[in-house]
């Protein structure tokens, strides 16, 4: 039963999945194009050029992927209400827990897959980049990992809010909209509140914490709502 | 005594601001087909959805094949075939894909039966559901509902909006389902003629309350119209307590009585200013109409 | 549908009785001869689109009246003496229908004398038309 549900969810989310794959390809392509135009990069060794490009492209693609996760999460549940198939699914013997688990597995697989892909790109670059002073202009490795972590937190927030909105709403497009807008609003909120209490140094930490908390809350609340909901 | 396949005990379902079913108790026996009749908004669909565990009753309990639906929903649904009023399945799947999907959801799926039904209904396997006509969609949903050889079959208005030929097809299929291992079929319908052909029993509900549950033959035998003629300028004095609906138009006093027996005629004549009274047989449809009219407003005097 | 017999779900007469009375007529008319099998309950149900339990009820009634009997494993068969039986049954039913019609007529204020005249006229009309049908 579970395999059939996964198959159904993959088919159901064909467009967001194609979109996700396309965004990865486009990110890499854009970065390669940009760097190939850059005379500084071109002047370097072949190895250095390649490593720089893979690294930058992985970070860029990782950032862009967070939007596609929002789109996927927002689409997962609500899209079945739009075409009324949620009703059909409700009267089959598939339990709501199993139905939701299949969706969670799909979302987690895509998120982890993308993260691993980008992580591998970055790690490979760092391994081969030993002969270089720094990967990019003066940025420390620590700063890069913090950037990577906050991008991931951003995506987690988008996915969690998308999950919640998708579980509650009957329209997948508004669920996707919520999922995209909410994490983008967090920095505005944290910067404003930091100014109010007049502390700036820890803004990034607070922001990442807020993203994680919102994402987690979204997943928990959404799941709870879905399990208790009646599809009619 | 074996447990009845479908049992509702005191089932009340409240939605925001209105009561869909009102302490409804029903028991459907093994080997029967039951027609659930009622006007729009009587609570038929709510009742059927509760039988599937799709809606939770506000109070009361429902057991299907001896199991409580609320606590064993998925397990019970393995044994129920259901066709909603306007089935959409997965609109983007092809007929074949829906069948394959359903085959892995239902444990007792019978692939040969599914193929047989697809052929019998002449459903194009590669057509997507969205592109099918209403009749075809109902048939596709019926394939899903029957191919796992359910013990209980629940159909919500299966004939509504279908042309007579498709209806004939469905009736024939439902009759053959009866001959298999399906223990109990419940169908709600407006088409009283179809119910009369298919069902052994009818349950008439109005405003969430059960008006009558009886075998069709008993209902026809025990429900009669009495046409009486009132004396000049007089009104009825003591109507029969079993009157479910009555109408007075000049000297003509019509009443539908349930349960009726012929001895009541003497009592009616003795206690009321009437010159004559005769008994008229009623069809299922007339009985249905009179019961609903009577439940809405017990007496009309012109 | 409806080739073998016609069922009217809008009639006040229960469907099993409609089926039973048509079977009785068909037996009397020789559609089914003595020692011939009747269609199986399931087949007839499918054919005339009626619940199989209803057919069973009709068959039970005919068996009770002695028109048909079940032979183990072989189905339901028309009994030898069934044509005489049909006539007897028809007579009893006619008696019942007549008394109900007469009772209705009397409550409507028609005199017994007038009823007798009307009955004689109706009978003559029917006999004439049925002999015309046969020639």
Image (cartoon, rainbow, N blue to C red):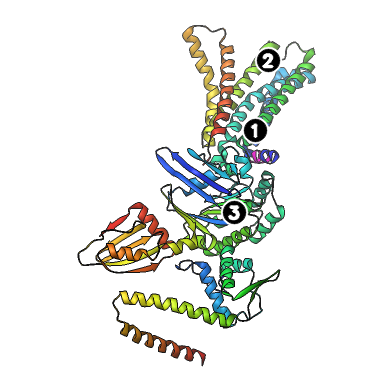
Residues tagged by mark 3 and mark 2 found on one chain of the structure: no
- Between B269 and C50, the residue placed more toward the observer is B269
Q: CA distance from mark 3 to mark 2?
A: 67 Å
Q: Where residue B69 sits: x, y (%)?
A: 57, 41
Point out the residue furthest to the bottom here.
C135
Residue drawn at the location 57% of the way across and 19% of the way down:
A213
What is the C-alpha distance between the residues marked 1 and 3?
37 Å
Subunit of mark 2?
A
Question: What residue range appears in magenta?
Answer: A7-11
Question: Are the residues flagged by discs 1 and 3 in contact, CB closer than 8 Å?
Answer: no
Is residue C116 found left or right of A153 in the rendered image?
A: left
Q: Nearer the viewer, residue B83 or A51?
A: B83
Q: Residues within 10 Å of mark 3 (few under 14, many from 20)?
A: some
Q: Position of residue C15 (x, y in %)?
A: 51, 67
Residue A83 visible? The answer is no
- Gap between marks 2 and 1 measured at Cα: 31 Å
Q: Residues within 10 Å of mark 2 (few under 14, many from 20)?
A: few
At x 44%, y 67%, the residue is: C12
Quarter in which the N terminus of chain A is drawn: top right
Q: Nearer the viewer, residue B252 or B170?
A: B252
Residue B294 lies in magenta, yes or no?
no
Disc on res. A145? 2
Per the image, the residue denoted by label 1 is A101
SS for callout 2 = helix
Q: Give the x, y percent position of residue A23.
A: 65, 31
* Residue B39 against residue A216 in the figure, above or below: below
Residue A174 shows in this picture = yes
Q: Helix or strand or loop: what does disc 1 sit on?
A: helix
**What residue is disc 3 on?**
B30
């Amino acid at each position: 039963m579970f395999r059939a549900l996964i198959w159904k969810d993959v088919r159901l989310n064909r467009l967001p999945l194609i979109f996700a794959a396309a965004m990865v390809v486009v990110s890499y392509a854009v970065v390669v194009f940009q760097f190939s135009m850059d005379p500084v990069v071109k002047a370097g060794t072949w190895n250095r050029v390649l490593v720089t490009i893979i690294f930058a492209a992985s970070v860029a693609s990782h950032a862009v992927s967070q939007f596609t996760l929002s789109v996927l999460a927002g689409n997962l549940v609500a899209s079945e209400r739009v075409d009324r198939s949620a009703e059909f699914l409700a009267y089959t013997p598939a339990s709501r827990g199993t139905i939701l688990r299949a969706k969670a597995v799909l979302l987690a697989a895509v998120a982890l897959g993308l993260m691993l892909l980008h992580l591998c790109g970055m790690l490979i670059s760092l391994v081969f980049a030993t002969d270089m002073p720094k990967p990019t202009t003066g940025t420390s490795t620590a700063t890069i990992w913090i950037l990577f972590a906050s991008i991931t937190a951003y995506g987690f927030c988008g996915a969690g809010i998308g999950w919640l909105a998708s579980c509650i709403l009957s329209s997948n497009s508004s669920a996707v909209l919520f999922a995209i807008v909410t994490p983008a609003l967090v920095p505005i909120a944290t910067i404003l509140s930091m100014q109010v209490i007049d502390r700036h140094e820890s803004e990034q930490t607070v922001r990442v914490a807020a993203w994680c908390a919102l994402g987690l809350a979204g997943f928990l609340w959404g799941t709870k709502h879905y399990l208790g909901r009646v599809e009619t | 005594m074996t447990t009845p396949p479908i049992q509702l005990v005191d089932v009340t379902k409240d939605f925001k601001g209105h009561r869909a079913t009102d302490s409804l108790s029903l028991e459907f026996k093994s080997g029967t087909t039951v027609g659930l009749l009622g006007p729009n908004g009587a609570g038929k669909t709510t009742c059927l959805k509760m039988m599937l565990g799709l809606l939770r009753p506000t109070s009361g309990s429902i057991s299907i094949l001896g199991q409580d639906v609320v606590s064993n929903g998925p397990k019970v649904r393995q044994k129920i075939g259901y066709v909603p009023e306007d089935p959409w399945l997965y609109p983007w799947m092809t007929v074949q894909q829906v069948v394959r999907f359903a085959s892995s959801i239902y444990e007792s799926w019978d692939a040969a039966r599914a193929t047989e039904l697809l052929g019998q209904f002449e459903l194009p396997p590669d057509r997507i559901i969205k592109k099918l006509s209403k009749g075809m969609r109902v048939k596709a949903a019926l394939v899903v509902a029957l191919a796992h050889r359910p013990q209980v079959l629940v159909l919500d208005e299966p004939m509504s909006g279908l042309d007579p030929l498709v209806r004939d097809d469905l009736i024939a299929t439902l009759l053959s389902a009866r001959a298999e291992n399906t223990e109990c079929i419940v169908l709600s319908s407006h088409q009283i003629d179809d119910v009369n052909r298919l069902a052994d029993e009818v349950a008439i509900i109005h405003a969430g309350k059960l008006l009558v549950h009886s075998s069709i033959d008993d209902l026809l035998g025990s429900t009669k119209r009495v046409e009486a003629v009132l004396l000049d300028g007089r009104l009825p004095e003591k109507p029969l307590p079993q009157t479910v609906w009555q109408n007075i138009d000049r000297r003509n006093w019509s009443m539908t009585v349930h349960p009726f027996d012929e001895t009541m005629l003497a009592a009616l004549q003795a206690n009321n200013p009437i010159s004559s009274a005769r008994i008229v047989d009623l069809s299922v449809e007339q009985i249905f109409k009179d019961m609903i009219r009577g439940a809405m407003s017990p007496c009309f005097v012109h | 549908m409806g080739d073998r017999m016609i069922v009217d779900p809008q009639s006040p007469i229960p469907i099993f009785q409609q089926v039973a009375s048509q079977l009785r007529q068909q037996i009397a008319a020789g559609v089914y001869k003595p020692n011939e099998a009747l269609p199986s309950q399931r087949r007839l149900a499918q054919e005339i689109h009626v619940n199989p339990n209803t057919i069973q009820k009709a068959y039970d009634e005919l068996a009770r009246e002695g028109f048909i009997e079940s032979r183990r494993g072989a189905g339901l068969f028309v009994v030898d003496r069934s044509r005489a039986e049909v006539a007897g049954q028809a007579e009893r039913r006619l008696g019942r229908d007549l008394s109900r019609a007469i009772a209705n007529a009397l409550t409507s204020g028609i005199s017994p004398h007038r009823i007798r005249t009307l009955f004689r006229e109706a009978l003559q009309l029917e006999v004439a038309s049925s002999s015309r049908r046969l020639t």
